[in-house]
Amino acid sequence: MKLIVRLLLCLLCILSAEDIYAATQATPAYRVDYIDETILLRKDTTVVVVNLDLEWPKRLCGSQMPVLQTYLCKQVFGSKASTMEEGKKEFLESLGQRLEMMPDDPHLYKCFLYVKLKELAWERDNWISFRLVIVGRDAKNPQFVPVKSLLFTYDIVREKVLTTDDLIKSSNQIGGLDHDYTLDVFDEYYPSIEQSAEGWKLPDQTCLLTSDLGVAFNLTGTDAGDGMEYLIVVPNGSARELLTRSAKKMMDTPARDRWKEFRKRKDLDFKADSTAADNDMTFPMPDVMPQFRGGEKHYSEYLSQEVKFPVYESLLQLEGKALVSFIVDKTGKVHSPSVVMPSSPGFDREAVRVVMAMPNWIPATRGGEPVDMRMTIPVKFILKRE
């Protein structure tokens, strides 16, 4: 079986400029922003290089999820802020003043901090799960030092963050459980394992994947004696004996039925705020929309060389489509990507990577002058069977 990936600019080929503009400017019901940024900061005699690699949820089912936003700001940035922008600002200011380049001073203490927030699973209209890893090291020691590692699930229906106590009956030994696949999203920090889960101790790190895939655990090696953490997937059949009654019910009940039950309860009052526009999604209508340089021919050549089918999704023989929104600025540079219609974490991540690797576009123009413009394109992943 041959894996074929196709990324199609259907909107550019079929719709008019007005239709493209209207579709691009609409506030999405789902939105995850992808941030990949390196910042240089100095405080007294310490210089910190901070790398932020974040997949930050902005909207789910039309809601901006204030509970989840506050939780993320606390866990990722150590902030009481209620938005990613506010939390990030407070976090960076606490580390020092921004620098343009590394000072040439041998007496300065130089260190590195890596902050990664990655989506692990999305059960449509039901829940979403993430892994947060923060590690650090100094310039003289290449060994990463764990600062924080966290798995969690956000219940979209009940607007509640679920941790291990909500999902697992016990955090004792789980010897004898066989893991399914490893989730290869943090392999530069934590290696994956290819052996039985016997002899591995379960820490306070658990989240749900999809109802088909099962549960993800952070496991700490005990028999191996390395004390390292490993992320594994335990399929539903093996994991059910560990799940709480509420977690089993959550995984067994379709989203539409959970929402029906939710709406009957008077003590819960979910209000979608899809009518509130995201300011960074809206731009004035240009005279000419952005264009990929070289037209469709060069675009197809770029795709054939750049797009890769994600390993995890290929193992499961999955197909899908993600919608990626991004800004083409007045110089033609592509930035600020968001997934506004998800497929799977691997597909979404690869779609964003492909978009961000694009060469500069021909920018939009208004009155003969180049202007910033937001674009939205579909990204399709298709298995071709011979």
Image (tube, rainbow, N blue to C red):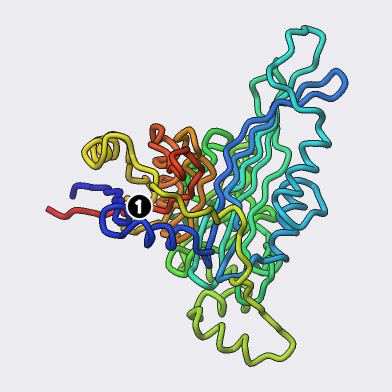
The answer to whether residue 173 is above or below residue 186 is: below
The answer to whether residue 264 is above or below residue 221 is: below
Percent coordinates x, y for residue 384 in the rendering? 19, 53
Q: Seen from this angle, which residue lies furthest left?
A: 386
User: Depth check: 165 or 295 in front?
Assistant: 295
User: Depth check: 205 or 175 in front?
Assistant: 205
Q: Residue, x 54% and y 72% (percent of image)? A: 126
Q: Seen from this angle, which residue lies furthest right?
A: 44
Neighbourhood count class around disc 1 (C-alpha, 10 Å): few under 14, some 14–19, many 20 upward: many
Q: Secondary structure at mark 1?
A: strand
Percent coordinates x, y for residue 232 in the rendering? 52, 51
Task: Locate residue 270: give its quadrant.
Answer: bottom right
Q: Residue, x 19% and y 47% (percent of image)? A: 2
Under mark 1, the amino acid is: Val
- All told, the count of numbered labels is 1
Return the residue at label 1: 379
The answer to whether residue 176 is above or below residue 125 is: above
User: Depth check: 42 or 286 in front?
Assistant: 286
Looking at the image, residue 19 sits to the left or right of residue 185; the answer is left
User: Depth check: 152 or 158 in front?
Assistant: 158
Looking at the image, residue 145 sits to the left or right of residue 232; the answer is right
Percent coordinates x, y for residue 265 in the rendering? 68, 90
Task: Locate residue 237: give its quadrant.
Answer: bottom left
Percent coordinates x, y for residue 211 in the rendering? 47, 70
